[in-house]
Amino acid sequence: MTATANVQVQGVKQTLKALKDIDPALRRAAIKEMKTAVQPMVNEVRSKMPNKPLDNWGEGGRLGWDVNQVRKSVKVKFGGRKVRGGSGNQYPLLRLVIQSPAGAVFDIAGRRSNGRSPQGTAFINALTADWGRASRTAWPTAEKHIQDVQRGVLIAIDKAAAEVNKEIRRVN
């Protein structure tokens, strides 16, 4: 059985909005706590980024491989746009992103096609032979850590909701 990265929690957006109105610093602390829950996953994705995926992968230009820059580009973003095709109002709470173009290409090359040119096909085949199928780092790591991340995020949300409720009771 594989874990999915889709967890639905009702009232998170309203809780965070209320928290922002009550105490913006507390909201920032809740978001920071959520991001902390994801940090082991981020660290593992960073560690899985190779020093150089292919011998002939160049170092210059937009898609050049710089392992330090690629590893630094693995981040967690808070929030995002409404989920297309989702039922109701679904928004991502946290997203794992690889901001480096080279890192993103390494991770997902070959996911939608086998290449549009002979060079592209050879590139994807070489990556697949050495590192496995797309997604090579991010998604397998997310599936491995999803339950721990969910637990940490839900704890942070529960703490934030408790603070909002405490403040509401105090005002009333």
Image: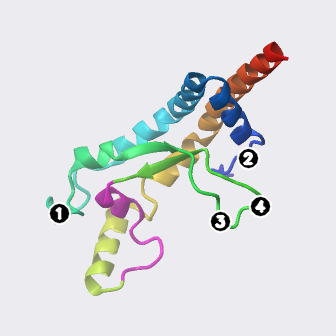
Three-letter residue code for mark 4:
Ser
Q: Residues within 10 Å of mark 4 (few under 14, many from 20)?
A: few
Between the residue at mark 3 and the residue at mark 2, the CA separation in whole angstroms equals: 15 Å
Residue beneath label 4, please?
87
Front disc: 3 or 1: 3
> Relative to residue 85, is residue 68 depicted above or below?
above
Res 61 label: 1
Quarter of the figure with residue 156: top right
> Relative to residue 51, is residue 135 depicted above or below?
below
Q: Residues within 10 Å of mark 2 (few under 14, many from 20)?
A: few
Q: Residues within 10 Å of mark 1 (few under 14, many from 20)?
A: few
Mark 3 vs 2, N-terminal side: 2
Range covered by the magenta-colored residues = 100-115
Residue 35 falls left or right of residue 123:
right
CB contact under 8 Å: marks 3 and 1 = no
Residue beneath label 2, please?
8
Three-letter residue code for mark 2:
Gln
> Relative to residue 32, is residue 104 depicted above or below?
below
- Residue 107 magenta: yes
Res 84 label: 3
Between the residue at mark 4 and the residue at mark 2, the CA separation in whole angstroms equals: 11 Å
Residue occupying the point 14% across, 61% down? 60
